[in-house]
Image: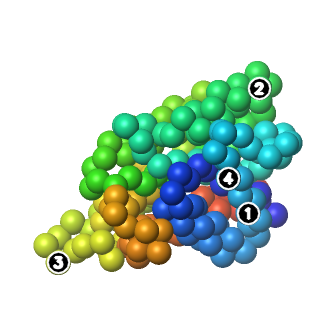
Amino acid sequence: MAKIAIVYFSGYGHTAKQAEAVQKGAAGVAGAEVTVFRIDEQGDLPEGALETLGAQDAIIYGSPTYMGGPAWQFKKFADASSKPWFSSAWKDKIAAGFTNSASVNGDKFSTITYFFTLSQQHGQIWIGTGLLPSNKKEDGPSNVNWTAGSAGALAISPSDASPDEAPRSGDLETARLLGERVAKFAVKLKG
């Protein structure tokens, strides 16, 4: 089995919905096993999580975009990952990322770039969405990759929308497809 981990923080529940979609996509791939680690409000993971991540074949990073970057709770996790960095414990593992913010742009790409840089510090192999954007006049939030993320899955959750209302269906399907793509690559590399 190829082991895929999803490590994310969610402040209000919107990014948690996106993480669930990523998990659904990865878990739907034959030969893939998915473990989810939610970073808590203090920026901590469960005991032993860093060691468990070292046994994974892929790690997918997620955080809402706050003020042009990932939440401080995710940054705390990233700083703590210097321990496995010392032994190259995550080297050659697949990496990918997803993020969510209230605005159409919201500087989401800065968060994806942060994840990419973190993955490269660890010597990981980055996987983007592999999806063309839905960028015609008739396209909207229900279309796959309407937010046009190539490097990672992007989602929009308006500031007055509950997690029941957003992210919208197109963004969740984009996240599901990212999880599926990562799992397929992990299974292929494992095989």
Report the residue marked by disc 4.
38
Q: CA distance from mark 3 to mark 4?
A: 36 Å
Q: CA distance from mark 1 to mark 3?
A: 35 Å
Dot 2 amino acid type = Lys
Q: CA distance from mark 2 to mark 3?
A: 48 Å
Ranked by sequence position, the earlier of labels 1 and 3 is 1
Dot 1 amino acid type = Val
Dot 3 amino acid type = Glu
Q: Residue at x 42, y 45 (%)?
A: 65
Marks 2, 4: nearer the viewer? 4
- Give residue 119's quadrant in the image: top right
What crowding class fits label 4: few (fewer than 14 Cα within 10 Å), some (14-19), or many (20 or more)? some
Q: CA distance from mark 4 to mark 1?
A: 13 Å
Ranked by sequence position, the earlier of labels 1 and 2 is 1
Q: Position of residue 15 (x, y in %)?
A: 51, 58
What crowding class fits label 2: few (fewer than 14 Cα within 10 Å), some (14-19), or many (20 or more)? few
Q: Which mark is residue 83?
A: 2
Q: Which mark is residue 34?
A: 1
Q: Residue furthest left?
A: 137
Looking at the rendered image, the quarter that the C terminus falls into is: bottom right
In the structure shown, which secondary structural element does the residue marked by tag 4 occupy?
strand
Query: Are circles 1 and 3 on residues that touch, CB within 8 Å?
Result: no
Ranked by sequence position, the earlier of labels 3 and 4 is 4
Marks 4, 1: nearer the viewer? 4
What crowding class fits label 1: few (fewer than 14 Cα within 10 Å), some (14-19), or many (20 or more)? many
Q: Residue furthest front?
A: 160
Report the residue marked by disc 3.
138
